[in-house]
C-alpha cells in the first residue's frame, strides 16, 4: 500500500526563438504538451513497473487535474484507486512547466507554475484517509509512504498510520519531506533520507564519510527505527540497522542525464525488495542500482526488472578468467562487498571432477552471491593424500573448474589448511560436504567469530573421487 501526496506534472513544450516586444521575456511558440504523474504518483509508477500490486491511498481535488491523475493510474498502471479520497474545495496539486528550445538546443525550463493548497487536511478528510488505509493494511505486505509535505500526512495522520501498520504486522518505509520536526515519523520501520534531510533530521552535518555513521545512529535512536538509509548520490548509500549493520554500499559511476525521480525510484525498489523478503543490505544494494539507472534517463522514467538484472550482470565479476592471485581476489571481493553481495567460500582438491562436485558447487552458490573456490596446489595434495595424487595436475584442474557456471573466482593455496585464506577473505558462508559435522570443518570457529556461518552440502550418493578411482582400477584389471 502506498500513501502519499499525489500530483500532476503538466509540461508545455515550444520553441523560444525571440523576445517579446512587450517585455524582455522569451516568447514560447506552442508545440505540444504532456501530463505525467508526480509526487507519490511517480512512486506508484515505479512500484507497478517493478511488479508490485499497488493500492493507492491519498487525496485528489474534484477537478480536471484529479480526473487526469485517476485516469493515468488506472490506464497505465492498473493500481487500486479505491483508497483515493476526493477532497472538496482543495485543488489537485499541479505543477505546470513551460519548456522552450531554440536553434535545435535541448528544451530548457523557463518557468514553473504551482497550483496547490499545502495546508493540513481537515478532520473529515483525515478520517476518510485513515479508514481507507486501515482497509488496505488487511492485505498489504508493506506500507510505503511518500511525504511531500503537502498537507495530507499531518503528524496526527502519520502517527496513526504507523500505529495501525504495527498492529497489523506491516513494515513501514518512509521517504520524508523537508519538515522542521521529524518526530512525526517516530516508530516507523525505516526512513530513507538524502544528505540534506538527514542533516535536518539530526542536526548533524554530513561533510565526510566519518559523519555517516553518527548521523544514521542518531536517526535509529531518535526515531526508534529498525533501519536508516541515507542516500549519498554518486557515493551510494549508508545503511544502519538496529541489528548492528553499519555499511556504506557503493554504486558505480553514472552518466547523469537528469536526477529527477531518482529518490522515488530508490524508495520503490527498497519497498519491493523488502516486501519480497530481501535483507536490508540486499534491498539497499538493489535500490542503489535502480536509482543509478534512473539518473541516466531524462525525466521520471520507471526502471524495469529487466534493466536492473542487466545491470547486475554487468556489475558481476569483471575478469574473463576466474583464476586470480590472492591480491586480485581480495580487491575484487572488496568491490563486491561494497555492493552488498554475500561471499561464499569453499576449498578442496577437486581432482577428478564428477557430478558430486557439480551439485556441491551449485549448493554453495545458492548460499550467497559470489562463490570463491580455493584449490589445493599439487604440492599440498601430495602432502595430504600421498605421492600418487593428484591424478589431474593443478592447471588442468583449474581449467576444468573455470568452465563451471556456479564458480565466480578461483584461487590456489599451498597450505594444508585454508585458515590464512579464511582470515583474509572473511566469507559470509563457509561450505563443506555433509560428511563433516560442523565442528569438524576447518575454520568454522573463525568464520562464526566474524559473523559468518557454515553450510553443509548434501552428498550425492555413490559420487566421490575415491569411488571413481576404484572403478577405474577395477575396469583396468578386468580389461
Image (tube, rainbow, N blue to C red):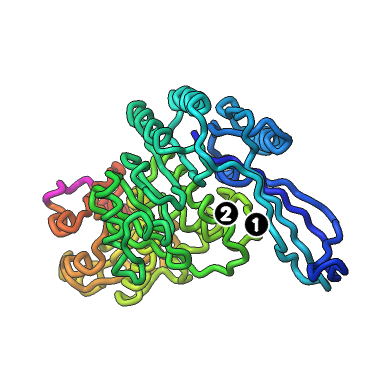
Considering depth in this image, is 81 or 373 the residue closer to the camera?
81
Q: Residues within 10 Å of mark 2 (few under 14, many from 20)?
A: many
In the rendered view, would you say 163 is above or below 182? above
Residue 134, image x and y in percent? 44, 24
Magenta stretch in the rendered image: 434-439
Residue 469 appears left or right of 251:
left
Considering depth in this image, is 405 or 8 the residue closer to the camera?
8
Residue 335 appears left or right of 84:
left
The picture quadrant where one finds residue 449 is bottom left
Considering depth in this image, is 324 or 159 the residue closer to the camera?
159
In the rendered view, would you say 414 is above or below 280? below
Query: Label 1 belongs to which residue?
Result: 299
**Dominant SS in magenta:** loop
Query: Label 2 belongs to which residue?
Result: 261
In the rendered view, would you say 12 is above or below 236? above
Residue 256, image x and y in percent? 58, 67
Number of marks in picture: 2
Residue 132, image x and y in percent? 50, 25
Residue in the picture at 58% in, 33% down: 59
445 in the magenta segment: no
Q: Is residue 386 visible?
A: no
Q: Secondary structure at mark 2?
A: loop
Residues at circles 2 and 1 in contact by the CB criterion of under 8 Å: yes
The picture quadrant where one finds residue 296 is bottom right
Residue in the picture at 53% in, 37% down: 52
Amino acid at each position: 500500500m502506498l500513501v502519499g501526496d499525489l500530483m500532476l506534472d503538466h509540461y508545455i513544450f515550444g520553441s523560444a526563438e525571440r523576445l517579446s516586444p512587450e517585455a524582455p521575456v522569451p516568447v514560447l511558440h506552442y508545440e505540444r504538451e504532456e501530463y505525467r504523474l508526480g509526487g507519490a504518483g511517480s512512486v506508484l509508477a515505479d512500484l507497478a513497473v517493478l511488479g508490485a500490486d499497488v493500492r493507492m491511498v491519498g487525496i485528489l481535488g474534484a477537478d480536471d487535474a484529479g480526473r487526469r491523475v485517476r485516469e493515468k493510474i488506472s490506464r497505465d498502471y492498473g493500481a487500486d484507486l479505491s483508497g483515493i479520497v476526493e477532497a472538496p474545495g482543495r485543488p489537485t496539486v499541479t505543477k505546470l512547466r513551460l519548456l522552450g528550445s531554440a536553434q535545435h538546443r535541448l528544451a530548457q525550463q523557463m518557468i514553473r507554475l504551482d497550483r496547490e493548497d499545502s495546508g493540513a487536511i481537515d478532520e473529515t478528510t483525515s478520517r476518510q484517509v485513515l479508514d481507507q488505509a486501515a482497509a488496505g493494511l488487511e492485505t498489504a505486505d508493506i506500507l510505503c509512504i511518500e511525504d511531500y509535505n503537502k498537507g495530507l500526512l499531518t503528524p496526527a495522520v502519520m502517527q496513526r498510520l504507523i500505529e495501525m501498520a504495527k498492529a497489523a504486522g506491516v513494515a513501514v518505509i518512509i521517504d520524508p519531506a523537508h519538515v522542521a520536526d521529524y518526530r512525526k515519523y517516530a516508530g516507523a520501520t525505516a526512513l530513507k533520507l538524502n544528505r540534506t534531510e538527514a542533516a535536518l533530521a539530526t542536526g548533524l552535518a554530513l561533510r565526510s564519510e566519518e559523519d555517516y555513521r553518527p548521523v544514521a545512529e542518531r536517526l535509529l535512536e531518535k526515531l526508534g527505527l529498525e533501519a536508516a538509509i541515507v542516500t549519498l548520490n554518486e557515493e551510494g548509500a549508508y545503511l544502519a540497522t538496529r541489528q548492528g549493520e553499519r555499511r556504506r554500499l557503493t554504486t558505480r559511476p553514472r552518466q547523469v542525464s537528469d536526477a529527477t525521480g531518482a529518490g522515488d525510484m530508490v524508495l520503490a525498489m527498497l519497498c519491493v525488495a523488502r516486501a519480497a523478503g530481501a535483507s536490508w543490505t540486499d534491498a539497499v544494494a538493489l535500490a542503489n542500482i535502480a536509482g543509478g539507472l534512473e539518473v541516466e534517463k531524462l525525466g521520471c522514467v520507471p526502471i524495469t526488472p529487466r534493466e536492473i538484472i542487466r545491470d547486475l550482470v554487468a556489475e558481476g565479476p569483471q575478469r574473463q578468467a576466474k583464476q586470480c592471485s590472492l591480491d586480485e581476489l581480495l580487491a575484487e571481493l572488496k568491490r563486491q562487498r561494497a555492493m552488498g553481495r554475500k561471499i561464499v567460500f569453499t576449498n578442496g582438491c577437486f581432482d577428478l571432477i564428477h557430478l558430486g562436485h557439480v551439485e556441491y558447487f551449485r549448493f554453495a552458490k545458492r548460499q550467497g552471491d559470489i562463490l570463491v573456490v580455493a584449490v589445493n596446489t599439487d604440492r599440498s595434495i601430495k602432502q595430504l593424500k600421498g605421492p600418487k595424487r593428484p591424478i589431474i595436475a593443478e592447471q588442468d584442474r583449474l581449467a576444468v573448474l573455470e568452465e563451471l557456471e556456479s564458480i565466480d573466482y578461483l584461487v590456489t593455496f599451498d597450505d594444508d589448511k585454508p585458515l590464512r585464506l579464511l582470515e583474509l577473505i572473511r566469507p559470509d558462508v563457509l561450505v563443506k560436504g555433509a560428511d563433516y559435522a560442523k565442528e569438524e570443518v576447518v575454520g568454522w570457529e573463525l568464520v562464526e567469530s566474524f559473523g559468518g556461518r557454515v553450510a553443509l552440502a548434501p552428498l550425492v550418493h555413490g559420487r566421490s573421487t575415491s569411488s571413481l578411482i576404484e572403478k577405474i582400477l577395477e575396469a583396468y584389471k578386468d580389461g
